[in-house]
């Protein structure tokens, strides 16, 4: 079963960009990536640019509205994701608790819907 690990944290949490602490944490992220790949559970994953680079698109009453910024104002923002292929939710939780920013962020785990068995017309 595939699960998406949605990585969130507050913009001011964690190491500051360009700091030695950020460089050390990047090493932890590379090691985490390697661990997922060596375990054979890595499907995909990417980091996202900061939330202030987001653009949101809505279509309302037949018109397209494009706004700067994220879909919702929240205290924590989506910073990246992983898709992993594991046996069950317990396994997904065990990988989520190893994410390098878990000490100051959070990981939302969502099962990925498998549409491959559905017929298309």
Image (spheres, rainbow, N blue to C red):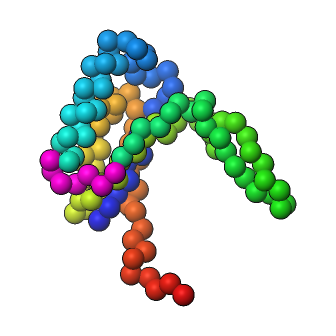
The answer to whether 23 is drawn above or below residue 77 in the figure is above
Residue extending furthest toward the left: 38
* Relative to 91, 2 lies left or right: right
Q: Nearer the viewer, residue 95 or 17?
A: 17
Percent x, y of residue 45: 36, 46
Percent x, y of residue 75: 56, 32
Residue 87 seen from this side? yes
Q: Residue at x 15, y 50 (%)?
A: 39
Residue 98 seen from this side? no
Q: Residue at x 22, y 63 (%)?
A: 87
The answer to whether 49 is drawn above or below residue 61 in the figure is above
Assign the N terminus to one quadrant of the image. bottom left
Tell me if residue 19 is in the magenta stretch: no
Identify the image quadrant of residue 30. Answer: top left
Which residues are the magenta region? 38-44
Q: Residue at x 32, y 12 (%)?
A: 20
Q: Residue at x 53, y 30 (%)?
A: 50
Identify the image quadrant of residue 88. Answer: bottom left
């Amino acid at each position: 079963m595939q699960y998406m690990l949605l990585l969130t944290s507050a913009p001011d949490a964690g190491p500051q960009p360009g700091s030695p602490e950020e460089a050390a944490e990047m090493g932890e992220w590379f090691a985490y990536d390697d661990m997922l790949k060596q375990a054979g559970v890595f499907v995909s994953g990417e980091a996202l640019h900061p939330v202030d680079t987001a653009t949101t698109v809505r279509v309302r009453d037949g018109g397209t509205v494009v706004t700067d910024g994220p879909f919702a104002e929240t205290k924590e923002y989506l910073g990246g994701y992983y898709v992993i292929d594991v046996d069950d939710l317990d396994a997904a939780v065990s990988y989520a608790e190893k994410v390098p920013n878990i000490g100051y962020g959070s990981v939302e785990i969502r099962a990925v819907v498998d549409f491959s068995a559905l017929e298309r017309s």
